[in-house]
Image: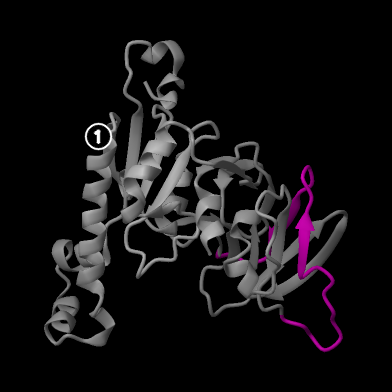
Amino acid sequence: MTKLASRHGKKHRNESRPKVLAIYKKSAFQLYVQERKLPEMKRLLQKRDRSVERLRESHDAHVKGVSEATRILRSLGAKVVLRYRGDAGNADDFDFVVTLGGDGTLLWASHFVPADIPIMGINTAPKDSVGHFCAGHVKDLKGLFQQALDQELAMMRLSRMRVEVDEVLVSNRILNDVLFAHECPAATSRYLIEHNGKVEDQKSSGIWVGPAAGSTAARRSAGGHVMRIQSKRLEYVVREPYFEPTQDYKMTRGYIEDGSELEIQSKMRPGKLYLDGSRLQFAVPFGSTIRMTRSDEPLLLFGYRRMKNKS
């Protein structure tokens, strides 16, 4: 029996096989060519346009990776449930979660994973995906899965962020970042930002806020700093602040200490929160208050140090 199989206690007393949820993405080729049959994509493929030159190769690599992952997990004795990420659902009844895709797939899946269930990302198309959070590639599968099932692969608890709007919970599982901005990216974002008793009335292109795991992505590009990965602080970075001639903002970047909070009050009617990317969105009405704090549900990630030590 693997060590993971004992997680559910009496519920699985007679079940020696660990339950693994494998969450996969659909490739751009599958979505746009095979399923939606978009005529413009077919036209570009037929003329071998450079914009789609890697579309089929990436698709084939990904499909092979998903097939290999499920085969190897089952050969190691795991009971595998394979789900498309759009149908992922709750992962509470599983012992282990594997994501098959890239960082986007892991970020999406992480919203369904509680603090006591480990997750591991596999980058199925490394030529086309960064895989910052992933433990390895398809060629590494057997060794990675065996170590993970035996709990011999390094695990790290990464802080996540809690987000509320008008005291209603939006998410307790933000791993990368949240962008608060006008729903139109070309429009000015207007809001009040408050932290540690200080308040500023600002105009900008929006505000990035998130835990340490997201500090190497958009926040870094917007002027933020790369944080120690196990930091319990959050960071906020104002995106493209608009300075009037007599104005000098003091709160364009800063840290939110563990136990502290950041508040943002919207001064625009069509404000929006974008949670760990563009797919999860939440409307913020004029006058509503967003509250962001460190979550009490960290993410238990397998193999993160392994890939970072290789780079």
Q: Residue 198: where, in percent of width, then height?
A: 87, 60
Q: How is the image coloured?
A: one colour
Query: Residue drawn at (67%, 52%), measured in percent from left and top?
Result: 290
Q: Left of 45 or right of it: where is 118? A: right
Residue to which mark 1 is pinned: 74
Q: Quadrant of the N terminus?
A: top left
Q: Residue 60: where, in percent of width, then height?
A: 20, 63
Q: Left of 93 or right of it: where is 84? A: left
The amino acid type found where label 1 is placed reads Arg
Q: Secondary structure at mark 1?
A: helix
Q: Left of 101 or right of it: where is 180? A: right
- Single out the residue that lies furthest toward the left: 46
Residue 270 vs 176, above or below: the answer is: below
Pick the front one: 146 or 236: 146
Query: Residue 260 in magenta?
Result: yes
Pick the front one: 59 or 263: 59
Q: Main secondary structure of the magenta part?
A: loop
Bounds of the magenta segment: 242-270
Residue 89 visible? The answer is no
Q: Left of 213 or right of it: where is 88? A: left
Pick the front one: 259 or 74: 74
Query: Residue drawn at (50%, 47%), measured in percent from left and top?
Result: 303
